[in-house]
Every structure is written in C-alpha cells, then in structure tokens.
Amino acid sequence: MTVSPPPASRPSTTYVEAIREGILEEMERDDRVFLLGEDVGVYGGAFKVSEGLLARFGEERVLDTPLSETAIVGAAVGAALMGMRPVAEMQFADFFSCAFDMITNFAAKSRYRTGAGVPLVVRGPSGGGVHGGPFHSQNPEAYFAHTPGLKIVQPATAADAKGLIKAAIRDEDPVLFFEHKYLYRRVRDVLPEGDHVVPIGQAAVRRAGRDLSILTYGAMVWTALDAAATLESEGIDAEIVDLRTLLPLDEETIFASVGRTGKAIVLHEATRTGGIGAEIAARLAERCFESLDAPIVRVTAPDTPVPFSPPLEEAFLPNAEKLCKAARALAGY
Amino acid sequence: MTVSPPPASRPSTTYVEAIREGILEEMERDDRVFLLGEDVGVYGGAFKVSEGLLARFGEERVLDTPLSETAIVGAAVGAALMGMRPVAEMQFADFFSCAFDMITNFAAKSRYRTGAGVPLVVRGPSGGGVHGGPFHSQNPEAYFAHTPGLKIVQPATAADAKGLIKAAIRDEDPVLFFEHKYLYRRVRDVLPEGDHVVPIGQAAVRRAGRDLSILTYGAMVWTALDAAATLESEGIDAEIVDLRTLLPLDEETIFASVGRTGKAIVLHEATRTGGIGAEIAARLAERCFESLDAPIVRVTAPDTPVPFSPPLEEAFLPNAEKLCKAARALAGY
Amino acid sequence: MPELTRQQRIVLYRHMRTTRLVEEKLVALYRQGKVVGGLYRCLGQEATAVGSAFALSRGDILGPLIRNLGSVLVMGFTPRDVFAQHMGKASSPSGGKDGNLHLGRPEQGVVSAISMLGALIPVMAGVALAARMQRRNLVAMTYIGDGGTSTGPFHEGMNFAGAQRLPLVVVAENNGWAYSTPLRKQTAAKSLADRAAAYGIPAESVDGNDVLAVFEASARAVDRARAGAGPTLVEAITYRMKGHAEHDNQEYVPKQELEAWIRRDPIEAYARELGESGLVGREELAAIDREISAEVEHQADLADKDPYPAAERALEGVYAAAPITPRVAARERS
Amino acid sequence: MPELTRQQRIVLYRHMRTTRLVEEKLVALYRQGKVVGGLYRCLGQEATAVGSAFALSRGDILGPLIRNLGSVLVMGFTPRDVFAQHMGKASSPSGGKDGNLHLGRPEQGVVSAISMLGALIPVMAGVALAARMQRRNLVAMTYIGDGGTSTGPFHEGMNFAGAQRLPLVVVAENNGWAYSTPLRKQTAAKSLADRAAAYGIPAESVDGNDVLAVFEASARAVDRARAGAGPTLVEAITYRMKGHAEHDNQEYVPKQELEAWIRRDPIEAYARELGESGLVGREELAAIDREISAEVEHQADLADKDPYPAAERALEGVYAAAPITPRVAARERS
Ligand SMILES: Cc1ncc(C[n+]2csc(CCOP(=O)(O)OP(=O)(O)O)c2C)c(N)n1
Ligand SMILES: Cc1ncc(C[n+]2csc(CCOP(=O)(O)OP(=O)(O)O)c2C)c(N)n1
Ligand SMILES: [Mg+2]
Ligand SMILES: [Mg+2]
C-alpha cells in the first residue's frame, strides 16, 4: 500500500510513527507544545501514538488526564489562551462528540468573539474496517465542518501524517486532526528529510487522470488507488484528489481537477447525508456547473450506524468494487 | 406575514400558541406524553411555549429539571425506552450542543443496535434576528442531519407548528424539533379544525412558480415569500418549497419542483459550509442533473459565528434583498 | 431483607463461576480469531456484578457496562447470547449490530449501554422516572467505573436522580484503574463514595470481592429506592485482574498490587466460605463446576454454529418501519 | 493575609457602588431601547463579585460570568467598556461581536465566558495548568451559579483541577435560583459546598452579601492556590434580587423571601458598617456616590456616542490572518 517502495538507503516510517515523529519534533522545537488525554502518558495512548514521549518530555508535558473529554478540550482551550500549544487526544474519534460543545462553541468562536485565538489540536483515531462497532469506528469530521473557526485535517499517507500534524500544531487556530486507525500500521513512507510541514488547506493529486475525478481523503485514498488500477485496465483513466484538509477545502485543486475531467465522484467512508461529500458536491454544482458533463456522484457509507459484525461492516463500508461500479457508470454517462 | 388573513369567524393562533396547542392536545390524547426541561413548568418555558401546562397536567407531567441538558435528553431516552413519550426542551437551540453525544450516540442509534426505538422529541428555539448574539441565535439543525436514526423538523407557519409537533410526538423515532424564535409571535394562522397532523417527511409548495425554485425552511420561508413578491414585479416567477422536514428530505417534492423550473436556490439562515443546503445541492446535482439549466445557488449566512451588534447581525443574516439579487442572476443565467 | 437461602447462595456461586468460565472460553475463542473486535474481561470483579444484580426483583431494570457479564447472566441472558454477541452472530441480542456486552432487551429488563461512559446514568434515571410515572414500583440499577465517575453525564444523571428522588441504584466499581490511569490521577476524591455528597444522596462502600457483602449493600439500596427514599451510590472496591482488554498486558500495574488482589479472588474466596460454613461441600461445588463447564462449552458451540447476519441487514432497522399508508397498502394488496 | 487598609475598604465600596449605578443606567438605556438583547443584572450580588475578585493580585486571571460586573470592574474594565458592550458598539471589548458581560482581554487577565454554563470551569483549569507550566505563580478564579453546578462541564473541570491540584478558585454563587428554578429542584445537595467533596478539594461557605467576608474567604482560597495546595470551592450565599433578566418579573419568587433579602442589601450593609466603624463618614460616602454617578453618566454618554461597527466587520476575525506566503508577498510588493 505504499505509494512507492522505499529505497534501501533510508528506512520507512509507518503512519502512526510519522504522527509521533511530527509531535516529537514540534515538542522539541517549541516548549509551548504539550500533550494531554486519557492514557497518553504511561501507556502511550490507546494506539501508541504518544509512546515514548512521556519518557522523553516528562509528566508535565505529557499529561494523563481523568476520563473527561470536555475537561481535556476545555483545559486545552484555557492553556491556548495562555499562549501554550496543547495537543489533546480523544481516545477514539467517536468521543469527540463528548466535547462537542467545548469544541464548537468555546474553541471555534473565541477568536471571533474576543480576538483571542486558541491554537490547539484535538486529535484521535477515526474510521472503520477493524470491527470496532458503532462507537469505535465513526468518521465524525463532517459534524464539525459546519463550524466556522475550526480547521479539519485527515492525512492518508505517512508523509502527510507527519507534515500535517506539524502544520496543525503550528496553526494559530483550533485544528481537528483525524487519524484513520486502519492506516496506523498499514501504510508507510520514506519521510522527506528536514522540517517536513504540509500546509493546511492544500489538497494533493495522487494520480492524474483524464476521464473523471475521484475526490476523497483518509483511508479511502487507498481504496481509490486500488480502484483506479482496475479502472485503468478497463480503459478508464481516473484522477484522484486527496483532499487532506476538509476545512477549509482546497477549492483551487478541486475545481481544477473537475474542470479538466468534467466528471466527479466524491468518495468518503463517513455516512452519506450531511457528509463532506455534500459540501463538495454543492460547491461543484455552484461553481463548476459549466464544466460538468455528468451528475456528481457520491460513493459513501449508507445512512446507518457502523455495524459490528464483519459481513455487516463490509456491506457498510465503501470499497474499490463499489467505487469501480460507480466510476464505470459515470464514465459511460 | 400570515399566509391568508384570518376569516372573522374563527380566531387565529400564533406560532408559539400553535406549538402549545399541539403539545396540549397530545398530552390529553396520550398520557404517556410528558414535558421536561429547564423552567418549563412554573415559568412556562423561556419563551412561554409550555405556559399553563403545569397547571393543567401537574408536576409529574411537566417537570422542571436541573440545568443539565445531557441529563434532560438522557432521561428522555430512558423514559422512552420504558414506553413513555417525552418531550424535552432545550432552552435555546444553541444548547442542543450540550447534549450532542446523548442525541447522536444514544438516542439515534438505539433502535439500530438493540431494536429498542426511543420515541422522543427534543425541541427548542433557534435562529437569529433578535440580537441574541453568538449563543442564542444559532441554527444547529445541520449538525444533526449527519446522524442516521434522527428526524429533524422546522415549521415555518403556525399551522405547521401545530401539525408537526403532533406528528413529532407520535413518531416512533427521535425527532429534533427546531422552532424559529423570530416567528413565535410574528406569524399566525387560523388553524385547521380537528386533529391536525402534518406528516413528517413532506415538504409544501408555498408558492408555485415557473422560473426557479427556492428551497427553504423556517423563518426564511417568509423571506422567500417577500422576495418572490418583488421578483414577480420584475417578471421572475419563483416557486417556493418549504421543506418542513430536514431529515428525511422530501425528495419527491424537491426534485419535482426543480424538474419543472430547472433552476434551484437553496436558502437557509444557518451558515453555509456543511449546512442543509449542501445536502440538497448534492442530491440535486446527483439526481436531477439533466433537469438543471443553471448552477445550484446557495443563499445562506456566511461562515462566521452569529454576531451580536445589529449592523453586524444584519450583514450576517440572509434577507430578501440578498435573495432577490441571487434570483435575478440565476433567472438571467 | 430476608436471609439468603442455601439455594440462593448456590445460585450466586453458579453465576460467578459461569461468568468466569464464559470468559475463559471467550479468551480461547479470541485466540482462535472468533471473537470480533476487542475482548473486555471482568476477571476479579465477578462478585460485584453478580451480587448487585442479584438484589433486583422481577420487573426491575438493569443497565450493565462491559464488565458486568455476571449481571447480565443474573438477568437471564444465556452464555449463548454472550458468545453470539462477541462473535457478531445473527442470533446475538443485537443481531450482530453491536458487540461485547452492548446488549439489551427491554422485555428482559436490560438496557444496552453505549461506549461513552457515563451516558447510561441519565438514561437509567429516565427509566426510573418513567417507572414512577407508570406507578410501577420498580428499581433501576446501573454501573459506573472509577474512570466513568469523572464524566459530565455521570454528574448530570446522578444530580438529576437526586433532585427527583428516583428509585435508582448506581454501583460504582472502583477497580483501581481506568485503562492505564490509576485512581489518584483520576481524581483527588478519597473514594467514589465521596462523590455522593454532591448529590445529597447516601453512599456506602463495600468489599466488591465479597459477593454477600455486595448483595447486602445492594439490597439495602434497592429497598431504599423501592421505598421511595431515592437513589444510592454503592461503591464496590474491587480490582481489575486483567488488562483493560485482552491486548493490554497491564505492564503499568505494580506487580505486588496485582498479586495481593489475585490472592483475594472473589470466586475462590466464596467457594472457601461455602465450604467452611458447611453449607456446600467441595464435592458438590466441583460437580457444579463440571456441569457449568459442559454447559458453557455446549452453548459456545451453538453460538459458533450460528450464522452471521445477512449483509442486507446492515441497512435495516435505523428507523421504525414506515407506517403503511392507505396508498401503499392498496398497492401491496393488489 | 494583611488587614485591608482604609483606602482598600473604600475601593471595595466604590466598586460595589459603581456596579449598582452602572446597572441602573443600563436599565434606563434598556428602556430607551439602547441596550441590545437582554439585560442580566446582579442586583444584590455586588459584594460577591467585588469581594472575590479583589482577592486577586496583578497577573492573576479571572473568568467572569454574566452576573460578575463587579469583578470585571475590579479587573480594570471601565463602565464605558460595559456600556459599549451592552450597546453593541465598535468600541466594546468584543467589537460588537458579543454582548452583555461576554468580554475578555487576555492582557488584562480576563477570559470571556460563553453562554453555556459550566464551560468556563475546564477552561479556567487550563489557564491554571498553563500558568503552572509557565512557572508563573498566578491564580485563576472563576464563578458558577447554583444552576451551573449541575452541568457536566462543571464536574469535569472541577475534578480535573482537583486531580491536577491546580491553582484555581471557583466561587459558587448560590443565589437561590436558576432562572425560575429554586435550589431544591436543582439538587438534593444541602449546599453547593457539598459538591467539593466529590473532587477532594476544600470548600467554604460564606455570606455572599458581606463583602469583607467574601474577600477574606476568597483571599484564603487564593493563598492556598498560590501556595500550591490546589483548588478551593468558595460558596457565596447570596440572592438574586431581580428576575433572571429585565424581562422577567420573577413572579415565581416568594414575596417574603425576596423582602427579607432586600433588607440585607450588600451595599447598604457595607455603607452602614463603614459608617458605624467610624472609618468613613456619611458625607464622604455621599460624595463618592455623587462622583461615581457623574462618572457613570459621563461614560455612558461616551459609549452612547461611540459608533456601531461597520457591517463588513461581521466577516472578519474568524481565523487568524492568513500568513503571507512568499508568492503573495511578491505580488503585493509589485
Ligand atoms: C466518554 C468515554 N471516553 C473514553 C472512553 C474509552 N475508554 C473505554 S473504557 C476506559 C476506561 C474506563 O475506566 P473505568 O470507568 O474505571 O472502568 P473499568 O474499565 O475500570 O471497568 C476508557 C478511557 C469511553 N469508553 N468513554
Ligand atoms: C448549559 C446551559 N443551559 C442553559 C442555559 C440557559 N440559562 C441561562 S442562565 C440560566 C440559569 C442560571 O442559573 P445559575 O447558574 O444559578 O446562575 P444565576 O442566573 O442564578 O446567576 C439558564 C438556565 C445556559 N446559559 N447554559
Ligand atoms: Mg476502573
Ligand atoms: Mg443562581
């Protein structure tokens, strides 16, 4: 699943290691950066994202907190107001919901209401494919995309995971950083050397193609790449845009791609209604209407909770097969 | 602002009275129905929606609760599991955020996960135009539209306010009922006689028109009607669809309207990105592509918190003038 | 509170032993890759779950958490239900929609938890509230961990129950740890019982590894609730003898602490007590163990053979079936 | 804790009187339709706000709620700031973006509340946490109403502060009512101080209408926090002498209860005390009142003449200004 095989000379890094490396570098660079969350210290986080950081930076900068998502994010807001750069972990992205008010009403509106911005990151593992059931598999990013004042990021590759967490920590505004748990140990990259920062707000074209644009993010980027290989063998040349930042969207890249291909599929693992795909489709329908040669298609999870049992979860999750089917229909439109 | 002047013979009813009447009738009809919330009893609710109901039904069916939105909704969930029909008030729609997890994770997923549905209503006043500032003016409906298992309703007229609250109380699933506070005492209707129930899931065409469709809901229905009068004088014939139910959307009515006019404006008071308008535009762009003669336009509040000061709030809120401007451009497309 | 009969004392033992054996079988199935997702055990906490739920009467309502396998068995769920649920089978109480102990059946008096800790407290308060309105003289019981008591929903639900004087019993299982977080990092409160003053309700701390003590404290709380005297917080002091879940080797736990608690295994202690008091002989207990063991194997086998749910079930059950409108009905009839 | 000087005692009086007179002016402006939105008063609670904030030192941080006008004045906001804020003027601390006492200026040590009650507690815990990391020996102070103590965020924030032993002082204003809801419907707890045991932190109940008593209790709590001994809950027992907001005639309040508290008006009581102790003569107080009254009128006048914000400001300030990238910079230079 790596984009290109690592050259023998330098070792490659997994997605989870890349996040850790990004956080570590930022903590070294800037002593205002600190971590807080449930089990992030001694245990290194439920998915070991912060493993080793307690030993390196001490208890004051890697805080094991009580089981209190609102207090965790609230404390991050307060610390950010004091000039710190907190990085708060939600043990699963599903638990962002427990801090919903603090995120959307306190953090997001602080700068606008009072001029005092709150540079903080709230991060956590999202997504399915690991049989986590209804409360350990959700993709809640769209819940937050309706909130002016927030930024939202989700990396698909190890290199982006590092570059985006660093950008998120440096950002002057609150950034929600969703990590796809399926990717933690399944994708790896040889990371660029030096201070590798991926700017928030910039999408990446993962594959150039002439026939249609697949706009996606997170684990679904890999699904799209798989599908594109199949489609290519059928003579369909798909372009794949990895959004990387979901708020604000990189309209320039999105519009340029659809402007070239005239056909768009928005692909996401989150459920359909009210997902990020709705916003992208709406912008395309408003701003790229003349370029569109076909309906804008959404390939997403259906409107249900995430089921637990493997055959149910498989039916629920979008996959390359479902995507290919949609792409074939669209290409033939 | 009434749709038609009340005939002298029967008195007309305001939006707030209509909600109260609907609740009262359901409480009389079904003794499983009860109210709970902050100040809903002795005070009759911050906006007096439940005025007089304590006197009529007693303390057991009209409960003044502690200041605890999560407990209010949680208790409603528990009571619904026991076969009751709770109607919970959030003092302002902005405070739905404080019960976000309970609503989206407990209430919405209960039937799917366990077969045990939770028939309950969570209602509250939303919307701006009364200088409530960032925390007493929000339109949070889209935050919840990404949640399978919920239904979402917002009436624009007094008659619908009554008919929809009755439908919501009778519904077998959790319904979020957003009341636009600007309308409480500003619109009135002569209510239909008898057991007036407006089915959830059905939009209403408020004005038939040939040139373009304005898809909207809540207070913006009145804005659209104002604008349509102006547009008519300019020779633009706008159709106005009052969505009434936001989840599930009435695709039949929406698609039929846009199918006829070929042009769509989605109008809402909520902020733009990730609003209900995004979902509607996405569905149109996918399912009505061939009917579309022009880009799908969204007229909404901009992506900012709701500002407090009158000139700022006026700049923020969509109004007839902004709508007319968009409609003219679209008609001329 | 009447004395427990010999028969009841044996039932307590049976539930604890069944809990233990079901879990051991689950571990085996987990290693075979047959358990879907994670496996959360309650090793060492069997007495708390069983003793508390045993204080309920028919018609009472229980809201279990993931460490309350014993309570679920007391409420009448079968090992097969539990195995099927863990294996994601169609026959599971959730039909494969949810896992671990997220199971419930209203008619069986069990409300299913969600993962978000604390959320069940206000819900169970609502259950108790409804029961009172319905003039059903029943009691609602639920659980919370030491970590869970730090959540906002716990606070709101407890305070609501106190203000409304609801028939609710909350068993706070103080097992010393919330995942890797020890109690002292969780709160500066000296005990979980100390949380009760904030709600103006009584609390009692009890040895959570002593099934009879847990039963008695719970029964007192249940009686109080049924008599209209409002909610009680019962703190059961116990220990999580395994990691948070099977993947967690609990390296962070001090060895001595763990060993000391292993010596206090609640099932062994109770078996000794039954034997020493002369109530149930060693032989009889051994026979019971063999019988349970066989039954657990049998039920695991049944669950193992149960089919997985059909894929199309994934799309069903989000909303109540649409009411049949006359138009649709007419169409269907023709 | 050194005795307050005569001068300091007069300053306390001045802040309370200013609070009262600013509010009276706000009521007049409200009736003229010049106050935007609702008007929330703190009539009868002036001593609690002023006495507590007065216990802070330069560099400390305060998070006021809507009934803490006195605290805001102690922290150096002017009546003009307050008028401008209520009138939605461009000169207001929020630039017209927010109303009532939702104001803050980090450099002035004031953090702005949001409406959602309880939310400020975890945020102020975070302020205290950051201060400790920054080796700034400062104290964070904030407020909560009796109603607000029922919220989840209050609980999570208090528990977090306790577990982390943070330098935080929380003043719980028990004014008997949360909108129309009396304390007995809010909670079965006997007092708000009883909430503290849940967090393992000390609490003290104090007469909230006695400015010196409030000051002393707050100063003790501030000293404790500054000494590293962790958070304290100070319960100030006081009364909301007006309705929840100007539109509320508080019909639901028992007449006798209200009248009894009106006789305990904190400003009148303090004025009497100053007079009887011989510290400040009647004449001097009257002169102060006249001076404040004139100043309040003057500042109201200034605020009234201040312009409203320009409409385009509505779209600004959601995010930090975009950093100037080299490409843009190049374009701008040319
Ligand atoms: C609101 C919430 N946050 C985080 C989690 C993740 N989580 C699951 S169990 C657990 C620890 C729970 O500790 P405790 O309440 O003491 O229960 P125990 O596991 O000891 O039975 C955590 C943090 C969760 N389930 N819910
Ligand atoms: C979370 C939340 N829910 C509801 C409200 C609406 N509300 C504003 S003030 C108030 C009563 C507050 O009572 P209390 O905390 O005692 O403060 P007081 O008004 O007495 O100063 C309510 C219910 C709110 N601001 N925040
Ligand atoms: Mg525990
Ligand atoms: Mg109060």
Image: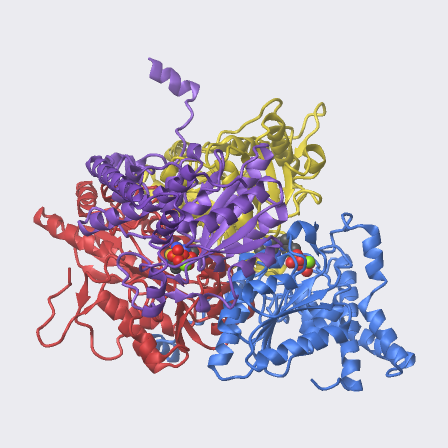
Chain colours: A yellow, B red, C blue, D purple
Q: Residue furthest top?
A: D334
Q: Is B114 displayed left or right of D178 in the figure?
A: right
Above or below for B321 versus A58 = below
Q: Residue C247 in the image: x percent, y percent?
A: 73, 52
Foreground pick, C312 / A182: A182
Ligand 2 rendered quadrant:
bottom left
Above or below for B16 versus D13 = below
* Residue ID at (26%, 75%): B196
Screen quadrant of the C terminus of chain D: top left
Q: Is B86 displayed left or right of D89 in the figure?
A: right
Res C307 → quadrant: bottom right
Residue D120 makes an appearance in the image? no
Q: Residue C288 in the image: x percent, y percent?
A: 84, 79
Q: Is D88 displayed left or right of A102 in the figure?
A: left
Q: Residue C194 in the image: x percent, y percent?
A: 63, 62
Q: How many marks?
A: 0
* Residue ID at (20%, 75%): B192
Residue B269 makes an appearance in the image? yes
Q: Residue B227 in the image: x percent, y percent?
A: 16, 50
Screen quadrant of the N terminus of chain D: top right
